[in-house]
Amino acid sequence: MSIGILGSGNIGSAFARALARAEMSAVIANSRGPSSLQPLEMELQPFIKAATLEDAAAADIVLVAVNWTKLSGALSGRKSWNGRIVIDANNPIEAPLFKPAELGGRLSSEVFADLVPGARVVKAFNHLAAKLISDDPRSDGGRRVLFYSGDDAAAKAEVGALIDRLGFAGVDLGALSVGGRLAQFPGGPLPLLNLVKIG
């Protein structure tokens, strides 16, 4: 399955590095255009290639990691995602103030899902510091834990397999209404926990 990355900030770049480390190919895009991504492309060649937002969004699996206030603009104009898997790696907070976004009592994943109509949304890759995503996931005799959740069993299975291929120990938190709340930052109890599964 093809992989696209929307967003080249800390999490998007860390995910790209994790893919390259596992010798997996993907395209990555940001709002500034492919030329702004040439240094990252050179670092991670031949596995990661710079692309347009449209090309990255057309992949079978699309990881979205965009500043919360820019999410709507980055995802606008795509009327339907036609059942493709979209990984929500976003948190409703951003530098430099780190003030939580007003979600009107909803989970951030619920807000995100409304921006990707027709997608099968899986929440993942948002709860660890970026460096822990890009670094070797083997630690202390085990594998670093990555939580994920979603409402589509087949989509979760695909993301779980991807997490495993990257060397992490995936832990399925269940439905978005449960896992999205547990892994949401700020507010959830799981973000920034650096857990290792032994055995």
Image: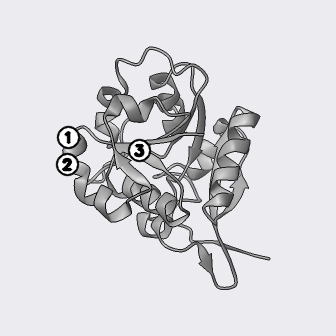
The residue lying toward the viewer, choosing from 57 and 110, is: 57
Instruction: Tell me the SS state at disc 1.
Output: loop
Q: In which quarter of the image is the C terminus?
A: bottom right
Q: What amino acid does circle 3 point to?
A: Val
Res 153 → quadrant: top right
Q: Position of residue 144 (x, y in %)?
A: 62, 70
The residue lying toward the viewer, choosing from 124 and 168, is: 168
Identify the residue position indicated by label 1 in the image.
32
Q: Which residue is drawn at 73% across and 43% down?
A: 157
Disc 2 crowd rating (10 Å Cα; few below 14, some 14-19, many 20+) is some
Q: In which quarter of the image is the N terminus?
A: top right
Instruction: Tell me the SS state at disc 3.
Output: strand
The residue lying toward the viewer, choosing from 59 and 64, is: 59
Q: Position of residue 36 (x, y in %)?
A: 19, 48
- How far is disc 2 from disc 3 in space, using C-alphas? 14 Å
Q: Position of residue 122 (x, y in %)?
A: 60, 39
Identify the residue position indicated by label 2 in the image.
36
